[in-house]
Image (tube, rainbow, N blue to C red):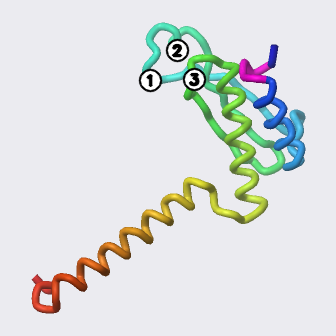
Amino acid sequence: MSKFGVSPEKEKALEARLRELQISEADLEETFIRSSGPGGQHVNKTSTCVRLVHKPTGIAVKVQQARSQGLNRFLARRLLADRLAVQRQGKSSPQEQQREKIRRQKQRRARRAKKRMGPDQQDA
């Protein structure tokens, strides 16, 4: 059984990624908090929200997506690895790339619409 409640393949992939980014378990400070939001009595009674802090960089993530603490621990480590990769490699995150792509599409559409309108309708 894995320590996060996910498949062994996913756990091994995460461990490999953390090793690649040179993140050790000793550098992580993990705290458990009560979740908020939907989930009823379960989230009110158990501390399933995970807050993970990478001590050397001070980057903190908080995850409460799942009702299980183990899965939230896995998701928090994955999110922390993503953020550290973005910081170290200078690449934009996949979410940022998606936002940039949508922004470019909207600019193209606006230019085409202005072209179709004609000069007399643009000032109205």
Residue at image mark 1: 37
Residue type highlighted by circle 2: Val
- In terms of sequence position, does the residue under pointer 1 or pointer 3 come before the other? 1
Mark 2 vs 1: CB contact within 8 A: yes
Residue 108 rendering spot, x and y as whole percentages: 37, 76
Question: Where the C terminus falls, by quadrant?
Answer: bottom left
Residue at image mark 2: 43
Tell me the magenta residue range: 3-7
Q: Residue at x 71, y 39 (%)?
A: 78
Residue type highlighted by circle 1: Gly
Side of 23 where 71 appears, left or right: left
Mark 1 vs 3: CB contact within 8 A: no
Q: Is residue 31 above or below residue 77?
A: above
Residue 119 part of the magenta segment: no
Marking on residue 66: 3
Q: Residue at x 16, y 92 (%)?
A: 119
Q: Residue at x 46, y 15 (%)?
A: 39
Side of 25 where 54 appears, left or right: left
Q: Is residue 18 above or below residue 87?
A: above
